[in-house]
Every structure is written in C-alpha cells, then in structure tokens.
Image (tube, coloured by chain):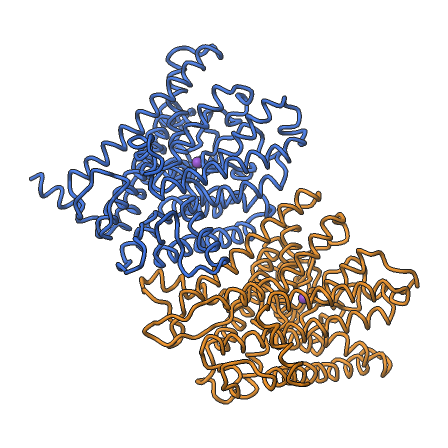
Chain colours: A blue, B orange
Amino acid sequence: MRRSVSTVILDQFHHPTQVIVGGFATAVLVGTGLLSLPLATESGESARFLDALFTATSAVCLTGLVLVDSETHWSIAGELIIMVLVQAGGLGIMTMATLFAVALSGRMGLRARMLVQVETKTLQMTDLRRVVRNVLILSLGTELLLTLLLGARFMIAYGESFGRSLYLGAFHSISAFNNAGFALWPDSVVRFNTDPWICLTLAAGVIIGGLGFPVLFELRHGWRRPSRWSVLTRITLTLTVVLLVIGTVLLLATEGRNPRTLGPMSGADQLLNAFFGAVMPRSGGFNSIDIAAMYPSSWLAYDALMFIGGGSAGTAGGIKVTTFGLLAYVIWAELRGEPSVNVGRRRVPVQLQRQALTIALVGVGTVAASTYLLLVLNPHRLDQVLFEAISAFATVGVSTGITPQLDAASHALLAILMFVGRVGPLTLGTALALRAKTRHYELPEERLLVG
Amino acid sequence: MRRSVSTVILDQFHHPTQVIVGGFATAVLVGTGLLSLPLATESGESARFLDALFTATSAVCLTGLVLVDSETHWSIAGELIIMVLVQAGGLGIMTMATLFAVALSGRMGLRARMLVQVETKTLQMTDLRRVVRNVLILSLGTELLLTLLLGARFMIAYGESFGRSLYLGAFHSISAFNNAGFALWPDSVVRFNTDPWICLTLAAGVIIGGLGFPVLFELRHGWRRPSRWSVLTRITLTLTVVLLVIGTVLLLATEGRNPRTLGPMSGADQLLNAFFGAVMPRSGGFNSIDIAAMYPSSWLAYDALMFIGGGSAGTAGGIKVTTFGLLAYVIWAELRGEPSVNVGRRRVPVQLQRQALTIALVGVGTVAASTYLLLVLNPHRLDQVLFEAISAFATVGVSTGITPQLDAASHALLAILMFVGRVGPLTLGTALALRAKTRHYELPEERLLVG
Ligand SMILES: [K+]
Ligand SMILES: [K+]
C-alpha cells in the first residue's frame, strides 16, 4: 500500500510543471475561499472577491503586495489564514524545488552533492520523506527562534502582552523567513527603524530563508569546510554578500541626503536602515523607510536587486542569484575569449548557460510587457509602474504606494505576475533541465540550479 | 609602393578595436575643433567647448541629440561641418563593419556569401577597394536620389529657392540615410507631419540606411532570388518588417487617443505618423509628433525599439536586430527542448550565441548604470532619463526634451554613451569573433553578424 502511494507521488515527477502549477493554484483557490468567509474580515462581511484572491495569491506566492491593510481589514482569523498560506507557500516551494533538484541530479547522473546521503540514481520514497522532514525542521526551527527573539522584544520594549507578543512574533517570523513581507502595521516596520533588535532579526530571517534549502542544508552540515562547498553554495553566498554591500552603500550614498528618508537619522541608524533597505528587495518586502519618499535612483536600484532576487530553491523570488551569477560568468568568459565557461573547477554545460539566458530574458520580456500594459491601463509613471511590476514578478511586495489605486484589470495582471514569478522560473528551469541531454566535456560538469 | 600601403592598412585589421575606436575618436576631435571655430556659429563667437564636443560626437556617432538648436546656433558653415561629420561617420561605420565582416568570413573559413566575389581566404587590397567603392556608390547614390525627392518637394510645395531646396534636401537626406536625425527645424519635422512625400522619403532613407551594407548589397545583386538570401538578410528584413508593424500598431492604438499627438489627426495622417513614429526609434531620430506629449507607454515602446535598433554593418544603432533575432531563436530552441539552435538550414555556433548574449547584456548593463547615474545627477524622472540614456546608447537622438537641462557631467556621460553605443557593439562583436575557434557540428555553420 505504501509502495503504491510512493509510486503515485513519484509518477508526478514526470510532469513537474503540472505538480508545481497545480499545487500553487490549488493553494491560491483554497486561500481565496477561506478569505472570502465573513469570519476572515474585521467587519464581519465577506471580502470583495478580488481582495480575497489578490491577498491569497500574494500570501501563497510569498509576495506581500496588498490591496487592503492587513491588520485593519482582516480579523485575527483572516490573519491566521494568511499566515498559514504563507507557511504553505514557503514549505511548498522549498520542498518541490529541492525534490526536483534531487531528481534532476539523479537523472543527470551527477552526484547530488547538496544532499550528501543521496546515493541512488532514482528518486526514492526515503528521499522524498527526508527532504520534507529536513525542510520542515529547518523552516520551523528557524521560525521558532525568530519568534522568540521578536516576541521577547515586543513584550520587553513595547509592553505587549505575552499572547500578543507571541502572535506578533510568530506572524512576522513566518513572514520574514518565507520572504513574504506581510506586516501587521500599516507602515510595514517603519516604526521600528531605530530598533536594531527587530530590524536585524527580520533581516536575518529574510536572508536565511532567501538562501534556499540546498544552501542552508549544506551550510548546516558542512559549515566547517568551506573548501568542499558546492558551486551553488559558493555563488549564492558570494552574490548575497556582494549585493547586500552594494545595496547598502548605494542607499547610504544617495538616501543619506534625502530629508524624507535616511537624512535626519544618526549615522548608526542610517547604516541600520540602509542595510535593512538592501536586504528587503531580495525579496523580503518589508520596509523601514517610506518607499514613496525614496529617490527615483533608489527605486531603480531596487528594481535591479528585486529582479535578480535571492537563492534557488528557497523562499526568495526573482531570476535568482545563481542565474545572474552564471550569466556573469558566461559574459566574463566570452570577454576573455575563453571557449568554455568554468566556475571553480567545474565546466558549466552549454545547455545550462542557455537555460540561464532563457530564464533571464523571458523574465525581462514578462516584466517589460506587463509594465507596458500597466502604463496603458493606468495614469501612473514608469518609475512607479515598473517598480510595481518587478515587485510582483520577483515576489518582493514593496510598492511606491500605487497598488490600491490601479484598476481591476491591473490587479488581475499583478496577481498573474506574482503567480508566474513564483512558479515560472522554477517550472521553466525544471522543464528545461529535464530535457537536457547528457553531454561529454573535458572537465566534470556540475548542475547549478537556475531559476 | 602600393603593396606597402595595402600591407600597412591590412596590418591594422589585426587590431580592429584600435582602428574603429581611433578612427571615430579622431573624427570627433577634428569635428570639435572645426565646430569651435568662430565661423561655425551664427553669432560669430566660438561655441562653448561642451556644445562643440557634444554636437561633433552626436554627428559622428549618427545620433542627433543636441544641446543647441542646430539651425539657429550654427552658421551655414557649421551646418556643413555637421553634414560632413555625419557623412564621414556613416561611411566609416559601414566600411569598417563590412570589412571586418569580410575579414572574419575569410578567417572563419566560411564563404563570404554577402560579397559573392570574395573567394580568397585573406583580405586583399582589391576587396578593400571594392568594399569602399561599393559603400560609396550605394550611400551617395541613395542620398542623391533622396536629395532630389526632398529638394523638389521643398521647391514646389514650400516655395523655397532652388539653392535652398537643394541644400535642405541634401542635409536631410544625408541625415536620414545615415540615421543621424539632425534637422534644420527646431521641431524636427513636425511641421511636415501631413506631408506624405516628405515623411515617407525620410522614412525610406532611414530604413534603407538602417538595413546595413551587407543586406543592401545582397538585395541589390540578388533581389530576384529571395530563396538564396543569406540568413543575415532574411533575419534583418523579417525583423525590420515585424518591428515596424508592431510599432505602428501600438502607436495607433495608444497615441490615436492622445489629444496632443495623433488624436486630432485624420485617419490617413494617423497612419502616416504612426508609421513614421515606428521607423524613427530604429534609429533615425526624427520626430513628426511631439515626443514630450506622447504617453509614457509609448516612451517605453520606444525604449524597446531603440534598444533593439536596426541592421548590422549599417548606420543604425542599438544591439541590432540580428542580435535580438538570434537570442529569440536561442530561447525558442531552449523552450522546445532542442539541443541545437538552427536558423533556416544553418546551425548557429554556440560561440555566436554567447556573443549575442554578451552584446545584449553588456548593453543592458551599460544603459542601467548610465540611467542610475543620470538619476542621481539630475532631478528628472526615470521615464525621461531612461529614454535619454537609451536614445544616446542606441544613437537614435529622440528626446523627451530634457537634454539641454541636464548638468555638465550628464552631458559628458551622454557623449560617452553615444560613442560607446556607436563603436561598442561593433568592436565588441569583432573582438569576440576574432577569438572564436572553428568547431565541428552536424550542420554547416553560418556566421551571423551580431552587434
Ligand atoms: K516578499
Ligand atoms: K540617430
């Protein structure tokens, strides 16, 4: 009996696109239904269909864009529904992405270095269970730790009750670790922007969740031996640090003179908020300074950071740092006239380069076409609309404030963008990779994750 | 003696980057010097250094962005200098790009299908002469025809004198064929926007010049046998038609309702001006409707059309339709799971795919970084500044009107962008191609031009 269940599940992995799309679509529909219940709203009346659909999509896809203020519009029950949807979306994406990575590694005849125990070439039930168990332990463990850190602070420094502190702590840790960006304050977390405890805890949650499960798993089991880290882990960590430093420096240099954002702050607070501001576009979605008041140059910097996104097989969005890093390697090799692209001592298969190219350019095309449609449909400017489109596509959830003002067609478009942005790169990446043929090269190949 | 001259010239082709960059830099410097002469200005005083440098760069690089109104600021002598610089820039880019294409064909061991007479594997003096002669005949012949068409119209319909008509005809044909976009009216050609004769003649000049010499040469000698056209010609013609149709349709659909642009016009005039508006971003640079009054969605459509640009080895800018088309083929092959990328019955070498990727993404990076700098330096919005940056990089020359308002550092940056946009893709493409090794594939390869 158990055998047949596992067979049924494993059979699905021949149709990864359907599994991922079907799974997320089901979660969105169930969430929409639940949020449409009268008990989900503060007013006790059923939410508008579009509000329920948009919020459910935003939660399941870990985005955080909202049409209605989360705290005042939804009841505690509604907030709990959002929390569960976020948790389901996060666990789902991590599990599925990791499983496909394992399955692909087996199929490609490569060592699944990210999961050192996996020795067989086919995906077996033990792997399925092991991956799910490890994802659960890692997610819930990290979230528990973050909950305690946040809850303690809410109780000690802000005089909240024990229960309320625990609730706020749990909601925002889940929101942070899953890169969902939902907050129970109308100003996101601007009110805490001089509190390093809150800001750094949230930032840590976003960064950790955004690294992706394979990297986290490898770090947990092999953090003492950086020399043996996989290429995936090295690229992800390097680019995470590089992008955080670039983001922090750019925000300090420009917003440091903005009287409506970092300008009036002390040096330490400027650094804290510039760092927080560099973490959130990739793709946490909280904000500790008023995004509408940021300079247009910072919006553009956000656009770039959001589009690149975080790590593969994690809760972050965007085309992923692995895709971006791989393309950088390809360009660098090409400019130096090297016939092959090597990362570390691994040769990157041509097929994989082409996948990265496809994911990046299909992403550019999707964002460009959506931005054009949003511009045609609404009276807003390119800087606002591009920011909104990339925020949805890269499932970041920050906004210059125009989200509720857009028309219904645009809201539907944003919901589609969030969905496509969440499942698109993964299904595209998996579908493309499943088709790849094994090839022969001089150096051993390594299958990087892209998308 | 002749032998040694040819040897000296041919030796240069081992250093194509220096030849191209050196040639254009010299032309810019000479042009700056000439435009700094008191006789070049209407006022009789020496032009500001930055005005002279910016105008000379804009002319040599076939861009058409201006800090000062061409007609009122420059004397007839100054206008003639601009005309000569444009002609030099156009002949220079066509000759050099074609020569490198021939040289590369020889080096790559491929048949130089675009120049059917070339049978030898090394570039010889006869080829050099033949290319220069053919470029001259084709350019000057087309420009003469356009001059007669425009001049006749200026004399008959607008009551200009014979001499003035000839002068206006020559200036604007040279400007059109070389995709330079300089006009001797402060509103570009808005005053002629109900005159199909003028508009269609200018559009024809821009389209023909923008196809590129290899395509024009092949069309001239083999227009009766489309089945034998090279892949280069087929991609260039197809994408030219496709992009013109898309641009026209988008402008009709959106600007057709804009009371400040196409709205008040008759249906025929709307069609004429939408078509003209679709031709000019690729990369003619004239405008028959007020660009500042266009909707932000049209600016974004222009951004995309400008970035893609026109044909290789011609007077157009941008990453070129060949680069864009090749990337589209790569993505299409990847999405369909095909291991190799075939265009027509030719397999596209992996090296060439990587070159196209490099040219496109280096272009994206250049535009993004420049736009960010312009945003930091100036109080303008993303839509205006991105438009300006792409217009300069793709050597188009249209503007939302902010060019003169930008600060001096931004003017220098725009001049650099124009220069990089003109010589960058070609030098990059040539330098990358010269490094390529011959490889073995199932299908015969064809060396497409990219950049
Ligand atoms: K998010
Ligand atoms: K131009």
Q: Quadrant of residue B258?
A: bottom right
In-image side of A399 versus B49 (left or right): left
Residue B270, compared with residue A380, is above or below; it is: below
x and y percentages locating residue A4 in the rendered image: 9, 43
Residue in front for this viewpoint, B186 or A223: A223
Count of marks placed on residues: 0
x and y percentages locating residue A12 in the rendered image: 20, 48
Q: Residue at x 58, y 66 (%)?
A: B426
Q: Residue at x 57, y 70 (%)?
A: B14
Q: Quadrant of residue B160?
A: bottom right
Location of the N terminus of chain B (image quadrant): bottom right
Location of the C terminus of chain B (image quadrant): bottom right
Residue A350, compared with residue B267, is above or below; it is: above
Q: Residue furthest left?
A: A1
Residue A289, compared with residue B240, is above or below; it is: above
Q: Residue furthest right?
A: B44
Determine if residue A52 is in view. Answer: no
x and y percentages locating residue A195 in the rendered image: 52, 19
Q: Residue at x 34, y 56 (%)?
A: A349
In-image side of A342 versus B27 (left or right): left
Residue B177, compared with residue B249, is above or below; it is: below
Q: Quadrant of ligand 2?
A: bottom right
Determine if residue A354 is in view. Answer: yes
In-image side of B150 versus A386 (left or right): right
In-image side of A306 versus B371 (left or right): left
x and y percentages locating residue A164 in the rendered image: 40, 15
